[in-house]
Image (spheres, coloured by chain):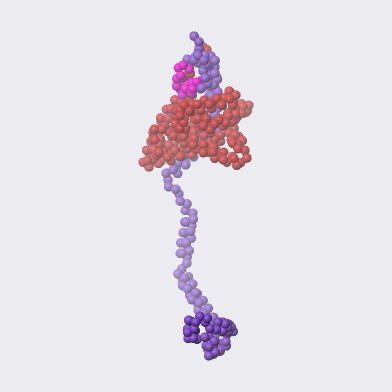
Chain colours: A red, B purple
Amino acid sequence: MNGDGRTAQGADGTPVSPAPTGAAEGRSAVITAVSDDSRIAVEVRGLVERGAMDAARDRFAELVGIHQRRASRIAYQYLRDVAEADEAVQDAFVKVFSRITSYREAWPFEVWFTRILINGCLDRRKARTRRDRWSVGGGISAANEARASMARPEGDPERQALARERRARLAAAIDRLDGRQRTVFMLCHFGDCTPREVSAMTGLNESTVRVHLFRAARKLRALLGGKL
Amino acid sequence: MRRALHLQDDRLFDCYLAQRQGEAADPPTAEHLADCDSCAARYAELALFMDGVRAEGDAEADAAFTPERLRAQQQQIARRMEAVGRPARVLSFPGRVVQGTIRASTLRSPRWTAAAAAAGLFLGIALGATYEWDSHPRPSAPAISARAAVPNPDVAADADFMSELELALDRPHTRELAAFDAFTPHFREIRDSR
């Protein structure tokens, strides 16, 4: 199923069972990257242990290239602030590099890295909540939303305005999710993670992750009136 | 044959997740979706909504993180990684400046400065002693003897007080101490003998 309104029916009107689509193909590409990144992480660890820091930095830059966009998406959805999300991503990569010697192959690198990134984002959210408590206008401030809306789609002004409004409604709805539901939902839908991976990242049972995902989706549909 | 009840929302959602991951859906669910138009429509609606949410979020994030921004981020990460594994840099500002100042002052002050300071001190002490000697002449011996001859009024008052005390007590009231009293010279007797 893709975003062009395709239904579960074939061209001849016969209902079809769900089949791998564009999203799934993207997922399989990510799976390939996961194995690659874990291998690179092991190499970087070896280089650091041997003291070849320059070579380790060069190799680690490949890891940054693989995960940078995905990490930025996750951080942005968490923080709704470009500058802060940028900093959170940088912090996560630097932290991972400085602790690469503690990386173990038992965990896919993606899981390890994402966990560190999420913890950083959660810390920043907490800090912002504390900060906003003492300043005028709490929660996700209007300024942040204004910054978020700077990311405008190209096209005519009416489309831009509609897209801005849609994104603002979506962001507000996601922000109203329970903390755990929000984490699970973001990791799965914006971070391209499977429920199993989310389970490894969050420490929750896989079935619990599925329940949270379902409840988050149901709540979002209710908040947004079933459509975007 | 009667068809099974409609699928619950959670089953539809599981089916959506499986489809997204490229996995096969649960066979009974897939069968039901193939048979039931109503459930297929619900599934399509759910999938459309979830795909829309995802696409909207990704588009927003991608618009915020432009390729230029991602490149700048990479450079910033590389710059910060340069500092990892290197010992902390010690700021040299205060130490070096103070040390340099001390060294400079040591080199500039010659030895004769210390000798001149010592000579000045010696001269000062000597002159001071001379001045003290001249301004306060020592009293002569006759003056001292004359001063000793004059009874000090304070001493006289004390003597009178002691005499009055002795008179008041007169004699010890304890008989055993009378012998000691007889041998002890009285202040009054000493004074009268002068």
Where is residue A142 shown, x and y percent of the image? 61, 35
Query: Looking at this rendering, what residue extends furthest in the front direction?
Result: B175
Q: Is residue B28 rendered magenta in the image?
A: yes
Left or right of A27? Residue B188 is right
Residue A16 can be seen in this image: no
User: In the picture shown, does residue A72 fall above or below B147?
Assistant: above
Residue at (52%, 30%) from the top-left corner? A181
Q: How many marks?
A: 0
- Position of residue A1 relative to residue B186, above or below, is above
Q: Is residue B51 visible?
A: yes
Q: Where residue B122 appears, x then y in whole percent? A: 48, 76
- B19 drawn magenta: yes
* Residue drawn at the location 55% of the way across and 23% of the way down: B49
| Residue sitting at x 49%, y 36% | A119
For the magenta stretch, what is the residue range?
B11-29
Q: In the depicted view, which residue is nearer to us: A41 or B72?
A: A41
Q: Is residue A8 above or below residue A52?
A: above
Residue A33 point in image, percent of width and height: 43, 29
Residue A52, position as x, y percentages in the image: 38, 41
The kind of secondary structure the magenta stretch mainly shows is helix
Identify the residue at the far left of this view.
A50
Foreground: B155 or B137? B155
